[in-house]
Amino acid sequence: MKTKAQISLEFIVTYGWILVLILLTIGTLSYFGILSPSRYIKESCEISNQLQCVDFEVFKNLVELDIRNEFGKPIMIHYLNISTESYGHIDECNCRIGGFDPSTTESFSCLPFAPELPPRNKVKFNIEILYQRETGSPIHRATGTLLANVKDATGTPTIAGPCPALPSY
């Protein structure tokens, strides 16, 4: 007849090996990206209350933003910059320069400065917009973030013409 200590030790060792195998399986799945926590983080785009990011799409070669003017008066966008720490600057943004009427939505397409973005990855972008409320008034800065999955497709810009250079202020 086995002693109580021996039975307890066999029980702990048996279930200890099972626990080690479960942890090893979870670690392997996480290492190969199958259990990636970023898959479960919601996509989002936030700029400010007055410049709302209504919709967005991120392709391998293109970032598209739909921005709504909620200022209550027309504004003029001078500069739109999208950057990411991991993949660099996105310089070429096709911007609509001129009046941006209140409660309207405008589309902005930005082509990556660096090589294509990696598909099926979640990437965090920093957004910077320089705008002016009225002619002669100071230029204001709005900043925000975009967290989106990169689609495994190539996008086509919606509006032609690059953004002008950053104004001095």
Image: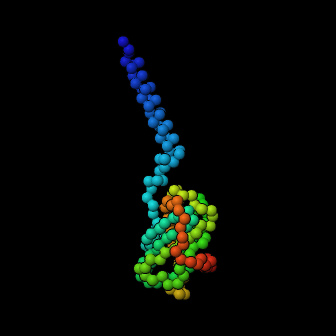
Task: Decide if residue 6 is on the left or right side of residue 160.
Answer: left
Please tell me which residue is depicted at 61% across the width and 70% down the height of the picture: 91
Judging depth in this view, the residue of 9 and 153 nearest the camera is 153
Please tell me which residue is depicted at 37% across the width and 18% down the height of the picture: 4
| Residue 36 on image: x %, y % | 49, 49
Please tell me which residue is depicted at 47% across the width and 33% down the height of the picture: 20
| Residue 122 on image: x %, y % | 51, 57
Residue 162's image quarter?
bottom right
**Quarter that holds the N terminus:** top left
Decide: is 137 above or below 14. below
Q: Is residue 96 visible?
A: yes
| Residue 103 on image: x %, y % | 41, 79
Q: Is residue 133 visible?
A: no
**Quarter that holds the C terminus:** bottom right
Task: Decide if residue 50 is on the left or right side of residue 137.
Answer: left
Judging depth in this view, the residue of 8 and 69 nearest the camera is 69
Decide: is 107 above or below 146. below
Please tell me which residue is depicted at 56% across the width and 62% down the height of the picture: 60
Decide: is 94 above or below 155. below
Q: Residue furthest top?
A: 1
| Residue 148 on image: x %, y % | 49, 61
Decide: is 31 above or below 165. above
- Looking at the rendered structure, the number of numbered marks drawn on it comes to 0
In this picture the colour scheme is rainbow
